[in-house]
Image (cartoon, rainbow, N blue to C red):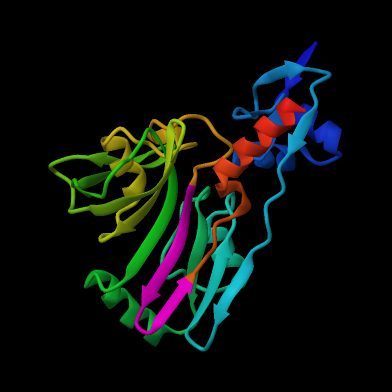
Amino acid sequence: MKEKAYILLAKQEGISNRAAKELIDRGLVYVREKKLKIARGLLPDNSKFKIVKIPEIKKIFEDDNILVLNKPPFLTSEEISKKFNLPLLHRLDKETSGILVLVKNENFRKKAIKEFKNKNVYKEYLAWVSGIIAQKEIINLPIKIIKTKAGAYAKISAEGEEAITEIEPILAFRTKSKIKALIHTGKTHQIRAHLKAINHSIIGDEKYGGESFKRIMLHHHKFKIFDYEFVSEEPKDFKMQEQNDNTRKKKKK
């Protein structure tokens, strides 16, 4: 016999159908080591589920102007804004981790927005991508944002607005590369779309051609504005080389 995945999960965990569906929609549920993507998909009655826990939101810095948080993946920026009852200075995609800045007064927000417009903000990301990136590269391709029922989509188009991303290799591991990405403009999904355009999609970013993985491997690592400078260290799931090394050691045993 088969049943809808979210109903089976609800029974296994003793939670509501709605809560079960939300866990699946967030990308937190696995069946036989594979991420469950469709909450209404049919599965055997005896299916066993594994649920990934969302890491805690950690505070990096706070003063009278801003609250700087280390955002875990699988939470939206809007959810975090609502939780702390403060407006966002910028946004990160749901599966992107790292520095997220909330503002505590309107005067600072207005000044900060001008800095963004004048491109006086430093935003550095780390990413794991498919393929080997061997040298620095500046990707200068205009982006047009298309609104769809499934959310926004960044399309490389001559009709779009200026978008510039600077990438630099950090290390290569088998068929993957870890890179640093600096964004000189702030378009929706900019890094994701630009990396797809040069055939080096971010691992886990299936929307932009990436191979399937537990999440989109993109992390907001460094941020500078005015006299502020913040760093968010790599999360555990970002140390992909170490994970693969450990997996090989276990197999040898």
Name the quarter where the C terminus is drawn. top right
What range is drawn magenta here? 218-230
**Residue name at image x 56 percent, y 42 percent:** 240
Question: Is residue 15 visible to us here?
Answer: yes
**Residue name at image x 65 percent, y 25 percent:** 40
Furthest-left residue in view? 158
Can you tell which quarter of the image residue 156 is in?
top left
Q: Tally the marks.
A: 0
Residue 248 left/right relative to 193: right
What is the magenta segment's predominant secondary structure? strand
Q: Is residue 222 magenta?
A: yes
**Residue name at image x 59 percent, y 55 percent:** 235
Percent position of residue 163, x then y: 22, 53
In the image, 135 versus 66, the foreground residue is 135
Give above or below for 94 relative to 231.
above
**Residue name at image x 76 percent, y 29 percent:** 7
Give above or below for 220 relative to 9.
below
Percent position of residue 172, x then y: 42, 40
Can you tell which quarter of the image residue 208 is in?
top left
Q: Is residue 144 magenta?
A: no
Give above or below for 171 relative to 17.
below
Percent position of residue 252, x then y: 72, 26
Question: Is residue 146 visible to us here?
Answer: no
